[in-house]
Amino acid sequence: MNKNNYALIMAGGIGSRFWPVSRTEFPKQFIDFFGTGQTLIQSTYNRFLKICPPENIFIVTNQSYTSIIKEQLPAILDNQILAEPIMRNTAPCIAYGAMKIAQINPEATIVVAPSDHTIAQQDKFIEAIQQSLQAAAENNCLVTLGIKPSRPDTGYGYIQYEDETLASDQGIHKVKLFTEKPNQELATSFIQSGDFLWNAGIFIWSVEAINKAFEKHLPDMYEIFHAGEAFYNTENEAAFISNAYQQCTNISIDFGIMEKADNVYVLPSEFGWSDLGTWASIYDMAEKDYVGNAVIPAEKVMMFNSSNCMVNVPDNKLVVLQGLHDYIVVESNNILMICPRSEEQHVKLVVADVKAKHGSKYI
């Protein structure tokens, strides 16, 4: 295993679209949605153990989640947890991780990945990551994985790529354009064109390449984190980071760097990827009965004349549903939510209304 391979797993989100199962104090990355015995972050960590030495895997998360990280990933050492004092989107946490890892190993090549994705075909995923790591190590480039789309989905960002490829790898294409979530008509045209991919939010680069990109495209942020070189991997790191984050703008790595840089490449990939962004994505991946009901767990749920429902309830509760079709039924944390599957995009708005009326007690 290449000792220069590193992984930075982003695990700081609050997963509000999976309310009420996902709560601010215990968000979705720490939950076992499918009853597999592994939470999403545990699955992600175990996936990267096949790519990186265990000491080269770092978790970036909110300070309030460090105890959960230690509980769910007991092999992770304190120095491998990058605790953010406040939420500032993906650019600051990646700058932090890149600077910290560069101080350990200036020859490092890093995979940056969310903690809450699922991968059905592990071998193909590992093959794509290793191919990208090699390309990033040999070239001054920023690589991202693009998922070959199976439908004109409006819930994903898209990446358009060119025929031009890396000289050392004909399968990795120059990126032409990043596009935010399109409407249905535009998404359909993307699929028909054949040169668009879903943006998976998985990035691969050398620490040298990404730090140069920060210096060029986000110079203020570069200076903020570059000033901490003497503090990374010491007892003074947390105090420095607390001050540094107060100075950072809230900006994504996509908008801050990937959409501006001229050395961005994409590897078209297929490995059964899902970002688990909504209850619909859980429904799509879950096992279903002969009338389309996905019930997790199924032991004490009784369905009568009901079809195409997504049901997630405590395993100690008897639940009886009759005459319900195309609904989401979720109970957790003393909260019951029932809504049509076609309207699940409003869950974030519901959460906001609950917070406005009842405060943070139920959030």
Image: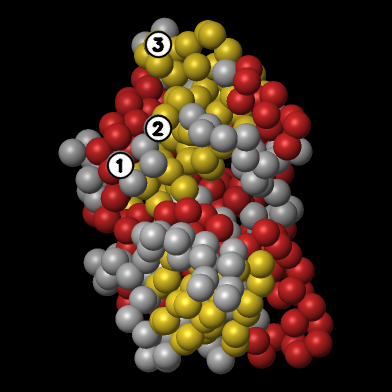
Q: Is residue 260 above or below residue 330?
A: above
Real-space Cα separation, disc 3 to disc 2, in angstroms: 17 Å
Q: Who is closer to the viewer here, 324 or 84?
A: 324
The residue under label 2 is which amino acid type? Glu
SS at mark 1?
A: loop
Mark 2, residues whose alpha carbon is within 10 Å: few (<14), some, or many (≥20)?
some
Query: Callout 3 environment at 10 Å: few (<14), some (14 to 19), or many (20+)?
Result: few
**Image vertical order of residue 299 relative to residue 158, above or below:** below
Report the residue at 70% width, 49% height from top.
Answer: 251
Image-quadrant location for residue 5: top left
Which residue is nearer to you in this view: 254 or 162?
162
Write down the quadrant of residue 260 in the picture: top right
Q: Which sits earlier in the primary sequence, circle 3 or circle 2?
A: 3
Circle 2 residue: 270
The residue under the point 62% across, 35% down is: 152
- Kindly identify the amino acid type of the residue bearing the numbered disc 1: Gln
Residue under label 3: 170
Residue 306 location (% of width, % of height): 52, 71
Identify the residue under disc 1: 121
Q: CA distance from mark 2 to mark 1?
A: 8 Å
Front in this rendered view, residue 339 or 30: 339
The kind of residue tagged 3 is: Gln
Mark 1 and mark 2 in contact (Cβ < 8 Å)? yes
Q: Earlier in the sequence, mark 2 or mark 1?
A: 1
Residue 172: quarter of image? top left
Q: Looking at the image, is mark 3 or mark 2 nearer the viewer? A: 2
**Disc 3, SS:** strand
